[in-house]
Image (tube, grey):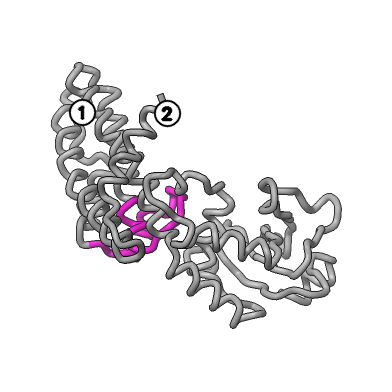
Amino acid sequence: MAGYLSRRNLLPAHYRALYLTGSRARGWDNESSDVDVVVVSPEPFAPPAGAAEAVGQGSLRISHAKVSVEGRAHDIEYWTVDQVRELLRKASWQVYEPGQGQERQFMLYEINFLDRLGHALALDGGPTVREWQETVRSSAFRAMRAAFWLHDARNYHADSEGQLGSGDVHSAALSARLAVECAVDALLARHGQLSPNGKWRARRFKEASPTALTFDAYWRLQTMQGFDPARPTAWISTALDEVAPVLKEVDAWLSTEHERHHGTGCGADSRAATVSHRERDR
């Protein structure tokens, strides 16, 4: 890999780490999957014109290149060592204060970077990659992602109850399904599955194997089994009832995590954050 990238002028002369990420690194790839690669160097690197584009903004603005190798697309991200350190600090317990909305300040490419780093396969710079992986594992990022999805799940849960009460069953059904998906993502984040990509939710669920919800129960809700368009209320009520314990479990875990790192529980803070975000989102 390094030799090919170097011959195509896609690899800086000096770099700290080169690793494989994404579905290929997790063994989830198929014939149409892209190959995702990350290069981390001491200094910014600009790939050849025509192959690259800039992603992000400010000090965390990175370069991204897309090339084809033997008919398979390769996505290459270029980060600097300082950018990785800045992002790791942004996700640290030293910075995170529940209830302040910090979990909503990550851009999608930043979330993907931190999630994929946890499953990275080092091609070069293995000790550095493993050090970063351990930093992510011990960071507040898992709690941040769980709090993010918990907030949205509570909102959709409350929305569905209100819509159902007003007789708007179609909106209530849609909100209930969104509540299910967000609650599951919160539960998966609590278990270290941090990807925001819904297409891998079932794979992530099986890998996490949470006790708060069985896979069969999740899959029944995800695929809306038993939903009768002529009588949607039954499915909506069941979905909301099954999601409620999941929300409580995630909230209790968040409270424990915050107490462990900061000395006080965060359950009340996360509920307050939910209210403030709902007001802000209106």
Residue 281: in sight, yes or no?
yes
156 vs 242, left or right, is: right
201 vs 39, left or right, is: left
194 vs 111, left or right, is: left
Badges 2 and 1: C-beta atoms under 8 Å apart?
Answer: no
Assign a secondary structure to mark 1.
helix
Q: Residues within 10 Å of mark 1 (few under 14, many from 20)?
A: some
Q: Residues within 10 Å of mark 2 (few under 14, many from 20)?
A: few
Is 67 included in the stretch rendered in magenta? no
Question: Label 2, on which residue?
Answer: 281
Question: Label 1, on which residue?
Answer: 161
Please name the residue shown 31% across and 46% down the image.
Answer: 269
Please name the residue shown 64% across and 78% down the image.
Answer: 123
User: If the image is split into quadrants, where does the C terminus sit?
Assistant: top left
Name the dominant secondary structure of the magenta segment.
Answer: helix
In front of the other: 196 or 96? 96
Is 190 included in the stretch rendered in magenta? yes
Return the x and y of residue 63 as percentages of the image width and height. Answer: 73, 54
- Seen in the picture, residue 26 relative to 87 is either above or below; the reply is below
The residue type indicated by label 2 comes to Asp
Assign a secondary structure to mark 2.
helix
In front of the other: 44 or 172? 44
The residue type indicated by label 1 comes to Glu
Return the x and y of residue 50 as percentages of the image width and height. Answer: 83, 50
**Span colored in magenta:** 185-210
